[in-house]
Image (cartoon, grey):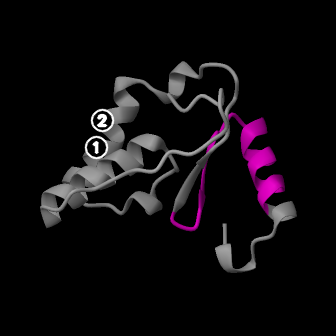
Amino acid sequence: MDVETLNNAELLEQLRGNFEERKIYSFVGPTLMITNPYEFYPELYTKDQKHFYLEKILTENINYKDLPPHLYGVVAEVIRTLQKNKVSQSILISGESGAGKT
């Protein structure tokens, strides 16, 4: 999504469309937004999914934003940046109480 022209209606419509396709991850500029599906999607958290993102980002050096949005992509990017820069990294997780952050 283009952050410079983003408005609430466009954001909600994009998130709604993704959610209906069981795509709970969306990039909004540099931010990964996650829509809580209130159910577990096991297909999103397989070993193959994890290895896909680690392989692409850490081995093939592909930018995480060039891959489908996923939490594993952000984590792999943090690992890559940590290894490259030798500087502590952080991830901010925000959401309402009971929204599934853990």
Q: Position of residue 34 (x, y in %)?
A: 61, 43
75 versus 77 height, above or below: above
**Three-letter code for the amino acid on which mark 1 is drawn:** Leu
Question: Horizontal placement of 83 versus 4: left or right?
Answer: left
Q: Secondary structure at mark 1?
A: helix
Report which quarter residue 11 is drawn in: bottom right
Residue pictured at 34% horizontal, 53% vertical? 90
Q: Judge whether residue 66 is colored magenta.
A: no
**Three-letter code for the amino acid on which mark 2 is drawn:** His
Question: Horizontal placement of 89 versus 63: left or right?
Answer: left
Residue pictured at 51% horizontal, 50% vertical? 68
The boundaries of the magenta stretch are 11-30
Q: Position of residue 52 (x, y in %)?
A: 34, 40
Mark seen at residue 51: 2
Q: Position of residue 9 (x, y in %)?
A: 87, 62
**CB of mark 2 within 8 Å of CB of mark 1?**
yes
Q: Nearer the viewer, residue 86 or 58?
A: 86
46 versus 3 height, above or below: above
The residue positioned farthest toward the bottom in the image shown: 4
Q: Which residue is mark 1?
A: 54
Report which quarter residue 86 is drawn in: bottom left
Residue pictured at 34% horizontal, 25% vertical? 47
The tally of labels here is 2
Question: Horizontal placement of 91 versus 99: left or right?
Answer: left
